Amino acid sequence: MKETVSRFAVSSARSSNVPQSRICAEFAGAWRIVVVGMVGIAVAPLVVFQYAFSAFIAPFQSSFGWGRPAIQLAFSFFFAGITIASLAVGWLHRRFGLRRVTLTSLVGSVTVWTLFPLIGKSVWSLYLFAFCVPILSMGTLQITWFSLTILWFENRRGLALAAVLCGTAITATAVPSYVTWIIDRWGWQVAGASLAVFPLCISLPLTMLWFKIPAGSTNPSSKHGCTPEHRFILSIREPRYWIIACATSLATACSLSIVSIAVPILRDRGMSSLDAAAIVGVYGIAIFVGRLSAGYLVDRVWAPGIVSFMISLPAIACALLASGTGPDAMLLVISMALLGAGTGAELDSAAYLLSRYLCKDHFQRLFGTLASCCSVACMLAPLAFGRFYQSSGTYTSTLAVSCGLFLVASLLLLTLGRYPTEETVS
């Protein structure tokens, strides 16, 4: 108990010693960075694919006769692509710069969606498309927007990262209903191709105008007699790094797997496709609330405690979804809200924890490796969950296992201990 109180005290003292004028100056000078990052994440194919995918499951079944487990397997190929992209993009950033890689990848994002209607009768065409989504748009991965935000923010970094990642809340709220509406009127091909409009007309112009690196930012240099490569190796050997990576991987894999089958889960409970998409939209609103709440609190109190609590909420959601059988709209809305609130505290909190516990100079490489770990977990989860559905014909086993893994991830974060001093992580 005394240890927990001291953790909260250390974090609160660090925040309270910063003049309010300096905190306000951060947002006054860099609000455009937050906006361009939020929009960049909202329209990134990586994010849009995740939240639009469940709306395409029924059309794929009716058009090609594919089964749900075969369709869900596309997520394994998708996350295999993310694994490669996460490791490669850090090197590209160092070689060509954040801005150039991002602009090139936004062009790749437009290309991704123009290729969507080419998905054909073979399910392997879906797998190839899913694999290429993150490869062609790797510069729009979260690591890009997080790296840019961390360069601009120090005292309210948690809130800034949360605000940037609220772009996924916009996507989760709007995209399922938008895609379902387009599919009902013009078919799945038009719905997929229409998604190219958003990176082309919104994110690309904003990035060209507002994507800037702060003056004085330099590449990592040698400090305390250590080469940058040696300091990166020391950081990645830290047990706390792997605690953060494991907790984030478990929570992210479960969250995204459930989101990918959210519409089918709700339709199995007797909801129409439009009603199911609307309820999934509640998930997006909850992400927005969860992210901002977590971002506000981690700047003021011990961050692992806050994130641990937030990640436990989806465990309750999974228990509620697994226990019911009928179309109880209120129960389903509450479940989606709890799932969204917890999902809102994962990747942005992982970025925050890495920047506080480990060397900030190597954030891109550390987060890229963490993102690859998450991708491997997310690649394996659909395989396991698809088997569960195939053997039982329901999603009850998937929900029960996810509930347990969310609780494990929550408990892992409580072992991180106090924040290290600046001298320790520099």
Image: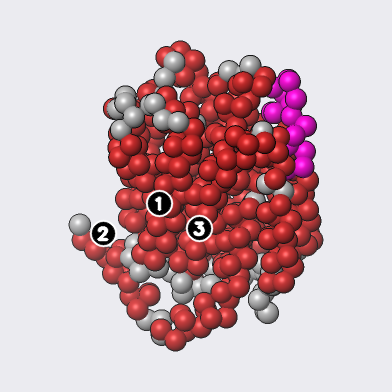
Identify the secondary structure beneath mark 1: helix
* Residue behind mark 2: 4
Mark found first going from the N terminus, 2 or 3? 2
**Residue drawn at (36%, 64%) of the image:** 297
Question: Is residue 79 covered in magenta?
Answer: no
Identify the mark at residue 166; answer none if there is no mark: 3
- Quadrant of the image for the C terminus? bottom right
28, above or below 147, in the image: below
Residue closest to the eye, 364 or 345 = 345
Q: Which residues are magenta?
A: 113-127
**Residue drawn at (42%, 24%) of the image:** 268
Cα distance in 3D space between marks 2 and 3: 29 Å
Identify the secondary structure beneath mark 3: loop
Q: Amino acid at mark 2?
A: Thr
Q: Amino acid at mark 1?
A: Ala
* Residue behind mark 1: 286
